[in-house]
Image: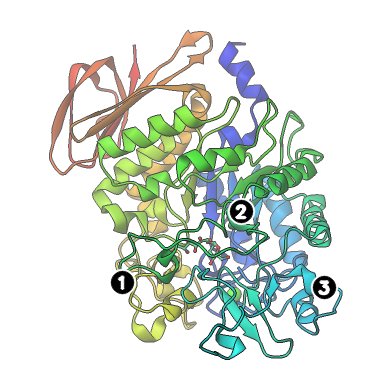
Amino acid sequence: MSMADSEFEAAQWWQTGVIYQVYPRSFQDTNGDGVGDLKGITARLDYLKGLGVDAVWISPIFPSPMADFGYDVSDYTGVDPLFGTMKDFDVLLAAAHAKGLRVILDFVPNHTSDQHPWFVESRSSRTNAKRDWYLWHDAARAGDNWQPAPTRLPNNWMSQFGGPAWTWDEGTQQFYLHSFLKEQPDLNWRNPEVRAAMYAAMRFWLDKGVDGFRMDVLWLLIKDIYFQSNPPNPEYYDAQHDVKRVLPVFNADQPETLEIVAEMRALMAAYRPTIGDKGVGSSRVLIGEIYLPLDRLVRYYGAGPQLSGADLPFNFALIQTRWAADAIAEVITKYEGLLPAGAWPNYVLGNHDQPRLATRIGKQQARAAALLLLTLRGTPTMYYGDELGMVDAVIAPDQVRDPAEKNEPGKGRGRDPERSPMVWVSAPNAGFTMPDAVPWLPLEAGWETENAAEQGGRKESMLMLYRKLLALRRQHDTLHAGGIAEVVAEGSVLRFRRVGLEDGESTDFQVVLNLGSEVATVSCAKGTVVLTTLLDGAGSSVEGTVTVEAGEGLLIALE
Ligand code: TEU
Ligand code: CA
């Protein structure tokens, strides 16, 4: 056995594998109500297995009034009837595990629904035992110009979805904090009872055998104890979202947050793997949704030789960076340089909060993006439908569902376009729901001619590219466990090398990506093309130079 092989044995599934995000409302409906459900995910596990991913992360499925489509939880240990029953979940989990697929749940620790019994109690009186479970605050003191209390906000913190982060409660004459909608009151994570309740909910699902959590807005859990106002953002301009008016100095990324992450990690470390028995290190994965600059982000891996933090603090840099070779080379180099010893990198290219990849960078570049994501060092996270090159759906004003869009209309906040139903077949409703049902959001344009079934039968389709890439990544230790070197931008071309050992032989790959709009020729060491993103030139030899079309990428096995 080679060195790389033995390293591979020790590595966790969430390091060598690929994560696939399912937005459950939009994946597969089985009862004709136009909303996807758990039975639908179970029915599509073979598709995911065939695609070649390793884990499915499912956006929230817990009981919820759906003010923010599940990110407003009213019961952390149940399943919303819209998605099915607990039995349906158990069936899904067992079926996934039987196929070797892991299941990651989306946990929402920062806030509950305002309908959660905890908040109902908390707001019932100032002396209620759960009062301190949330963040209540008196109105600011009246100044010289007397103003009524409900208008005297405690500070200038803004909701991520527009407007102040405070809502006045008439009944108890105080404000409560909500980093998102007023229907999503923030929990007080300084209260040990809150922590205990949330950890009990995590254990409930871990005991069932879920393979990990994606923790919603992990960097927001703790707020400044004095509730100090944020400094104004000198770069704010009117077209920006409200939340950008101030800099998030006092209501985000507070040092105590890292203690909580460490507690979550310690809790999860006690659990055994659900499939196989490679019980080394962390077998249930802790993923953090963290929108921070890279230098702040990497702190969420935690400190010390055992890294006490999140296994994968989501790295959104590829989404936030200009799509250009120099910018992306810089991101990769910077990120690799910032990673603490023992930390495992990861990259995300899309999710339910961001415009679709193929819309952001175009269908042609989306092919290069697929090669980039699946050949970088670290765990890739894919968003459902990106493997088909799905684009943002067009949402007419009367079809808007996202509260973020309703709150701040016209500011490009709306996330409905990237949440449109998965397109399966060239039949009514694209096979997402029954032919006579009404999908909760409209389908993307072009689904009739491009969908999973159609692409599955077309040799050069995007789906075939993803399948091929996922298979290559699985097949080669170098691609899923090897190192990365020589990350270089040369004009519009980004290239890097993956280095490793396979069966005792050094097996290096060269990745060449043309992120520009014109054909380019760059130098390249001697090797054999393993894959081109156009799926047309595998098997040919290269030496000296290679030519890459706009939006094209090459994977070359070096001699
Ligand atoms: O998103 C966190 C977040 O910061 C979002 O406001 C994000 O910046 C924005 O949607 C980009 O347009 C998480 C979830 O992913 C999101 O769906 C939820 O609405 C939010 O938390 C509240 O739970
Ligand atoms: Ca349904």
Identified by mark 3, the residue type is Lys
- Looking at the rendering, the quadrant in which ligand 2 lies is bottom right
Label 3: which residue? 130
Residue 420's spot in the image, x, y percent? 43, 69
| Above/below status of 301 relative to 60 | above
Q: Which mark is residue 83?
A: none
| Above/below status of 340 relative to 260 | above
Q: Secondary structure at mark 1?
A: loop
Q: Residue furthest top?
A: 504
Look at the image and name its color scheme: rainbow
Residue 172's spot in the image, x, y percent? 74, 86
Q: Marks 3 and 1: CB-CB under 8 Å?
A: no
Identified by mark 1, the residue type is Asp
**Quadrant that contains the N terminus:** top right
Q: Is residue 266 left or right of residue 14?
A: right
| Disc 1 packing (10 Å; few <14; some 14–19; many ≥20) | few
Q: In the image shown, does 119 or 226 lie closer to the viewer?
A: 226
Q: Which mark is residue 218?
A: 2
| Disc 3 packing (10 Å; few <14; some 14–19; many ≥20) | many
| Disc 2 packing (10 Å; few <14; some 14–19; many ≥20) | many
Label 1: which residue? 238
Q: Earlier in the sequence, mark 2 or mark 1?
A: 2
